[in-house]
Amino acid sequence: MKIEFHYETDFKLDVEEGYSDWISRIIAKEKAVLGELNYIFCNDTYLLNVNEQYLGHDTFTDIITFDYVEGNTISGDIFISIERVIENAAKYEVGFAVELQRVMSHGVLHLLGYNDKAEEEQTLMKSKENEMMELFHVEQ
């Protein structure tokens, strides 16, 4: 089906097609089918409002994923705070692009059924993020 990118901030992906191809390959690697997937890039305030309104959480976060998966068809809305990505990149001493890829893959991995509540799940999630980031090939 399709992956769309929406911008509620000044940030824009340089090569949307490359990111779409990468996310599609993640889904295919997990033997699932792409449905309708929306990435919404925003700032902290925007995502805090989403977090409060829909999840009842009064906290900043880097990503919120809304799951519309039906069977093996992966669909959802993935909200990403660019401000959190910038801050986390500095915190973890990685480049912005690397942290953005981690967060983008994290969202789709949730839709693919991976969780990160328990320590064991967090370890698997981190491993899957690293595996999926190696699939990233975008000509800049």
Image (cartoon, rainbow, N blue to C red):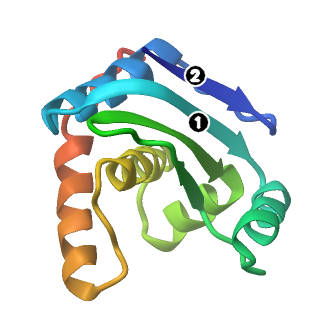
Q: Are marks 1 and 2 in contact (CB under 8 Å)?
A: yes
> Mark 1 Cα within 10 Å, few/some/many (few <14, many 20+)?
some
Query: Please, what is the three-letter code of the amino acid marked with disc 2?
Result: Glu
Residue carrying label 2:
4
Q: Residue furthest front?
A: 71
Instruction: Name the one closer to the observer, 88 or 105.
Output: 105
Give the quadrant of the C terminus.
top left
Earlier sequence position, callout 1 versus callout 2: 2
- Tell me if 25 is positioned left or right of 5 in this view: left
**Quarter of the rendering containing residue 125:** bottom left
- Tell me if 131 is positioned left or right of 84 in this view: left
Query: Please, what is the three-letter code of the amino acid marked with disc 1?
Result: Tyr
Q: Tell me the SS state at disc 1.
A: strand
> Mark 2 Cα within 10 Å, few/some/many (few <14, many 20+)?
few
User: Residue 134, image x and y in percent?
Assistant: 19, 40
Residue at the spot 70% in from the left edge and 29% down from the top edge = 6
